[in-house]
Structure formats: structure tokens, C-alpha cells
Image (cartoon, coloured by chain):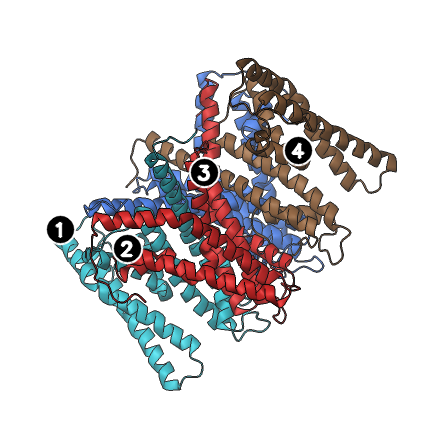
Chain colours: A blue, B cyan, C red, D brown
Amino acid sequence: MLGPMRTRPSRPAADQRRLHRWENRTELPLATASLVFLAAYALRVLGTGLPPAVHDLCIALLLGCWLLFAADYAVRWRLSGEGPRFWVRHGLDTAVLLLPLLRPLRVVPVYEAVRRRHRRPRLNLYARVMSYAGLAALLLGFAGALAVYAAERSAEDSTIRTFGDAVWCVCATLATVGYGDAVPVTFLGRTVMVALMAGGLALLGAVTGSFASWLLQVFAEEGENTGRPPAS
Amino acid sequence: MLGPMRTRPSRPAADQRRLHRWENRTELPLATASLVFLAAYALRVLGTGLPPAVHDLCIALLLGCWLLFAADYAVRWRLSGEGPRFWVRHGLDTAVLLLPLLRPLRVVPVYEAVRRRHRRPRLNLYARVMSYAGLAALLLGFAGALAVYAAERSAEDSTIRTFGDAVWCVCATLATVGYGDAVPVTFLGRTVMVALMAGGLALLGAVTGSFASWLLQVFAEEGENTGRPPAS
Amino acid sequence: MLGPMRTRPSRPAADQRRLHRWENRTELPLATASLVFLAAYALRVLGTGLPPAVHDLCIALLLGCWLLFAADYAVRWRLSGEGPRFWVRHGLDTAVLLLPLLRPLRVVPVYEAVRRRHRRPRLNLYARVMSYAGLAALLLGFAGALAVYAAERSAEDSTIRTFGDAVWCVCATLATVGYGDAVPVTFLGRTVMVALMAGGLALLGAVTGSFASWLLQVFAEEGENTGRPPAS
Amino acid sequence: MLGPMRTRPSRPAADQRRLHRWENRTELPLATASLVFLAAYALRVLGTGLPPAVHDLCIALLLGCWLLFAADYAVRWRLSGEGPRFWVRHGLDTAVLLLPLLRPLRVVPVYEAVRRRHRRPRLNLYARVMSYAGLAALLLGFAGALAVYAAERSAEDSTIRTFGDAVWCVCATLATVGYGDAVPVTFLGRTVMVALMAGGLALLGAVTGSFASWLLQVFAEEGENTGRPPAS
């Protein structure tokens, strides 16, 4: 797309600075585009009774946002000066480019950054990890429920008939409960679900682990404050 | 409810002391009210053969307890002097006010505090976390089973026909096993179940993590006591 | 059973020594009795085609072993000199007395102790925790499968028809997978299953956590040995 | 197979060196044989429409690879000079010899070693554990799906009719979700699935735990870089 580039191990500092400036400037517009993308996709999937013009608008918005993401990827690729190695090194970005529904996951760090700039009081380390991973799981689950619903609603023998069923199935999957009363049967639906399992397992493991660590910390501090060491 | 209040970042020490005194004094009555609330709700849901007067009494008790909780919330809000930010900062309290079934979770720290005052021997840190999280999961599961049973027992195509089914379903959910033989089908029942998944995952993750840490500690100490370092 | 005893906070050292000696001496016979108990129970449940005399022998063995456990509990209670507080402090022992199927769990530390006496090379800390928790989960699962099979095989609408089904169901429960194709329907079977969930979750959490810690340790050591610090 | 050997606690250094040299030389050929074994097994199971000659070739490849594994095991056994204790000490190798489908798990460390030799930039500790455990889970899952499909496709009342069903069932099992819509019913299929549960639980626990630790590390570092300590 940008043609072959020379692979240089280290770039001049000027490029580094330009890359940094680019990322700082595009952070907020791209986060907004991510949310617009998710909203347009949701409207496209859920708005079955809407006039065709709205559907066309949604598709236009989806395409426009995706072109924004692609342009940003291309600029950052060129500024990084890494050549094809960029695809592997920034594997998450490449994956997000191919699966733009994952894009809203990048909203979370931006929210954190904006909050920091406004000098809001920062949360405890564990609370930040929990809120980050929990919010990411929420966005991932919402995008996944939309994709599963779109894939399953017209399938034969499907047990996912309403968007509520899709949300229920996604919740049961992310929590690794898996009742099996609402399960995808199409190839696309199952693929989305497997991706959700992988992502959800990691994110909820982070939430659970942080919660456990935080609880241990709270109890340990309380033990110190009362002045009596806990029995060994 | 209390009208707009000025947002002041720091309150005079006198207010802080009054807030602290308030919390110390209301701790035990509120914990009692929480258990009364849970008991009245249980009686309301499970006592199908009881005379209507008992049902009316239960509703009166539920309402009375909830008014107590609301009054306590209002007083603490005013004493904190934080204005509308109080709603967010004390998000757990706000959630508990809206979902009073979660209230019994606050019984556990009170039990711990009472125990400490009576100078009972304290448990190991891991044992305290385990007992706290385990007890919280038990109360959460009981309240959840009641709510699910109330929502599901009269639903069409429901697989939860008895309170035993509801308890079984809640156990399978909290342990993330999820057999799927007894599953909620109503919107309310599913919402309760999703809340249970989130809470149960975190609480049981804390129990599991503490148990693992405690086991590692026990084995590490044993290795030291026998005087022979374990093989690397 | 032994009548009220005076509650004394600390016992003379002689009693402590006698208690310790008692435990050292009864360790091996009790562990043997535990395995005999489990074997007799297994024969009782699984040996449907055996002559009645064998069944009677099994029942006699079960009763005899249980009496041994009760006698040991009584002696240790007396030697500890703790009065009724002994029931709570040694809650695990009390539970094991009431549910002797849990007794084989105590075999694992004895095996470890015997191994230590014979000066076998000791395992890594994580390996010991993993093998202990894994072996305990195996014994717990076997006892649980027997109990579930005994409760379910003659129940109406049961999906557990063979011992293989019970083992399959127990495996799916301990791993928190929970397919739901073989599920207990009786009150007793479900109670056993809930106990298995609680125990299995904790034990397998310990196995998983130790495995993760061990893997991290192995990789960290490998990074040091090659002399190159891993990229941050 | 090699006849009884004398048990010697420590071998001369020359043998140690020879063993080390043997392992270094056979590493790459054996890893290749492992992948050939997996590929031949996959072709054997999935290639239903292929001519019989291909099937015979697959069987020949499987047998040939297995003989290579057995020869390597025998040589290492002899060089180690440990006698029958070798079977226990190298329990994983013995298991792999009996269940050669597990063999591809050894490919992962070889890949890591080859990468190290070529002086590629090393990953973060958590990233390495995650990629190792994730890749191992992937290979284990693929081999397990093949074995389950081979066992189930011709079984009566089976819910696993296509290879896609087998993969779906394995994914749901490894993630401990367990929907129950596609479940093995044969003895062999269930045995494979239980092995997958055990392996998958440990491996994914390692992935999850490393991810949580890594996330905590990233957030902790970020907190330090911004120069403001997080609120306690």
C-alpha cells in the first residue's frame, strides 16, 4: 500500500517526535470514531424497522470510520519507519484494522488519559486495572453480542432469536458459565464466540485477580491499623 | 431529596468526626435491619401458604428497613458535605440503596468488627479473606436465589419450578459450572443471574486465590521447619 | 459424648506432648482405615452383582472404620483439653467425622510425611502444592462420583445411569466446565455436587495458580541463565 | 526393553555431557517429527475422501515418527543411567511416549530455543509465558479435536458430527465454558476430553495469570512514569 520501505533499526529522533505528536493529536478523534463505528454497527444490526436511508447512512459511517482507522495505521506505519515488521510488532493494531469491532477497546486508555489531564484524583492500582479490564470486557461483550446476533438471527435451528438472547449468551460465555440454552450454531457466530472466550477469559481473569489482590491488601492494611498482627 | 449542596473539597474536622461517630453508632442497627430485610424478603417469596396478614407484615418490614437505609444514606450524604459527587464516590452505597438485597453483604464487615472488639483471636490473613468472601458469596447467592425464584416460578417454559431449583442454578452459576438444566428465561431472572455471575466470579476468585496463596504459604513454612530446603 | 470439660486456654506441656505422640502413632493406621473405608464404600456402591455376604462385610468395614475415626476424634478432643471449642477450632476434623467420605483427603499429607521420613528427594514447592491439591481433587472426585452414582442411579429422569456417567459429570464439575448432559436431579446428588464444586474450585485453583507460578519461575530462571535480561 | 540396568545415583560427567550433546542434536529433528506426526494424524482423520494409498502413507508416517520417539526415549534412558527410576522421574516423557499426540507440546520450547539462537529480540517474561502457554493450548486443542472427532463421528447419538463441532466442543472445554450442545458420548472421546480439561485448565490458568500480572505491571509502570503516585 505504501510500497516497500527500507528497514532501519533506529529512526532519527525527529521521526520519533513526529510519531508521538501524531498519536497525541489523533487520540481523541480516533476514540470518537471508534464509538461512532460501534454505534453505527449497533444501529445497523438492531434497527430492523428503520427506513433504508438510515441503513445506508450506517454503512457510510462504518466505511468512513474504517477508512480513518486505515489512514491512521498507514501514517503511523510510515512514521515508525519499520517496514513490514510493523505488522507483527503492532500485531494488536493490525488485528484491530481487520476487525474494527475490537477498536472500541482503545477507548478505555484514552478515557484514562483524558481523566489524567484534567487532574482528577487517580484510583488505586488495582481499581484502575479492574475498571480498565471490566470496561474493556463490557465493550467487547457488547460488540460480540451484536456480531453474534447478526450472524444467528436468521439461522436455522438457532437458539438466539432476540438481541436479549445474544446478550445472555455472551454474558454466560464471558463468565465461563456456559449454560447452553442459547448457543450459536453458524460458523461465523461460533468464531465470534471463541474470540470472546479468549478475550473474556483474559480480561475477567485480570478483574478477578486484581479484586483478590485488592481484598488481600485491604485486609492486610486493616490488620496493621488495629495494631495487632494477625495470627500466623 | 436534600436539595443542592455546595461542593467543598475538604470538610471541617468536626464534620468528619460526626460522620465517623454516626457510622460507628448505626453500624449494628443497620446490620440487623439488613438481616431483617433479607428474612422478610425470604418469607415473602417462600411463604406461599401463609395468611395474607403475614405477607402484609413482610412488605411493611421491607419498606421500613428500606426507609432506614435511605435515611442513613441521606444523613451520611449531608455529613460528608460532598454534594452530588457523593453518589459516584460511594457508588457501592448508591447501588445498595437501589438494590437493597445486596445490603446483607455489609453484615460481614460488621461481624468482623464485633469480633475484633471482643478481642477474639484473629485469623490468618488468607483465612479472613476466604471467610469474608465466602460468607459474602453465600449471602449474595441466597438473596439471588430468592430473587430468581420470585421471577421465574410463574414464567412459561421455566425450568426453575422450586426454590431448590433456584438454589441449584445459583450454585452452578457462582461456581461458573453452568449445567444449563435449570436456567432463568425471564428478563428479570436473567438480569439477576448476570449480576450474580459478576459478583460471584470476583468473590470466588478471591476465595480461590487466597486458598492457593495460603496453601503455598503452609507448604513453604513446612519446608523451612523440616530444615531441608526444597529442591529448586 | 465425653461430658463437659473445663475450658483451659493453655494445657500443660505434658498433654501437648501426649497429643503429639498420639497423632504420630495413629497417623498411619488412620490413613489405612481411610483407604479401607473408601474401598469398602466403592465395593458397596459398584458391586451390584456380588453376594449379600460381601455387602454385609462392606457395611461392617464402613462402620468399623468410622468407629476408629470417632475414637481418634474423642481421644484428641480429650488430650487437647479445649472443650466444645474443639468442635469449631478443628472444624475440618468435625466435618470429616460427619462426612467420612472426605477422610481420604488426609491420606495425602501422610504420604508426604512417610516420603519425608524415608529421605526421598523433595519436590519443588509448586510441584508439592500441585501434587497435593491434584491428588486431593482426585480422591475427592472419586468419593463424590461414588456418592452421586449411589444417589442417582435409581432416580426417575436421571441422566446418570452408569458409574462412567457419574465420573464424567464429576470431571465436568471439578473443571467448572459443566456440560449439562449428565446432571444430578435428586436432592442428595445435588448436595454432593455443590460440595464438589466448592472443594474442586479451591483445589483446582491451587493447582492452576501453582502451575502458573511455577511456569513463571521456570521462564524467569531461564532468562537469567542465558545471561540476557528480557526486554522490559 | 533395554534390560535391567544398575541404579547408580550419580553418573560420570562424560555421560552427562553425552546426554546433553544428544539432546542438543536431536532437538530439531524430533520437533520436526512431532509436527509430521500431528500432520499425518490430521490427514488420517480428516481426509475421508482420499485414496487408500494416502491413508497407508499416513499410518507409515505415524509409525515411523513413533519409532523415532521411542528410540530417542531409549537412548536418553541409557545415557541417563537411572534405570527404572527414569520412567517416574521423566514422567512427562513417558506419558508422551504412550500418547504421542501430546508430543507437539515439545515443539514450543524448541521454537523458543531456535529464536534465541538467532538473537531475535526477547519478549517480556509475561509475554513469553503467555505465548508459550497459549501456543501449547492451541496445539493441545488441535490434537484433542482430532482425537475426539475420530472417536465420535461414527458413534450413535453423537452430537459431534463434523470436525467443526469437535473444534467448537474443544474450545468450549478449554475455556471451561462447556455449553453442552456438542458433547462426546463414547468412552474414548470422554477420556480425551477429561485430559483436555486438565491440561487446558492449567495452561489457560497460566495465560490468564500472566495476563493479569502483566496488566498490573503495565499500570504500575504508567503510574510511576506520570510522576504522581496512585492514591493508596
Q: Position of residue A86 (x, y in %)?
A: 56, 25
Task: From the top left corner, tell me how far across and down residue B197 is, in percent.
Answer: 47, 56
Measured in 3D between alpha carbons, the distance from the residue under mark 1 to the one under mark 2, in whole angstroms, is 55 Å
Q: Percent position (x, y) of residue C114?
A: 44, 40
Letter of the chain that mark 2 sits on in the rendering:
C
Specify the subunit that label 3 lies on. Answer: C
Q: Which residue in the structure is indicated by mark 3?
A: C115
Q: CA distance from mark 3 to mark 1?
A: 62 Å
Q: Residues within 10 Å of mark 2 (few under 14, many from 20)?
A: some
Question: Disc 4 residue type?
Answer: Leu
Q: Is residue A54 visible?
A: no
Identified by mark 3, the residue type is: Arg
**Mark 4 belongs to which subunit?**
D
Q: Which residue is mark 1?
A: B13
Element marked by disc 2? helix
- Label 4 neighbourhood size at 10 Å, few (<14), some (14-19), many (20+)? some
Q: Nearer the viewer, mark 3 or mark 1?
A: 3
Q: In the image, what residue occupies the spot 64% across and 34% down?
A: D96
Tell me which amino acid carries mark 1: Ala
Tell me the residue that label 2 is attached to. C79
In this orientation, which residue lies closer to the viewer: B229 or B135? B229
x and y, in percent, of residue D225 in the image: 34, 29
Q: Which label sits on residue D222?
A: none
Which mark is on residue D97?
Answer: 4
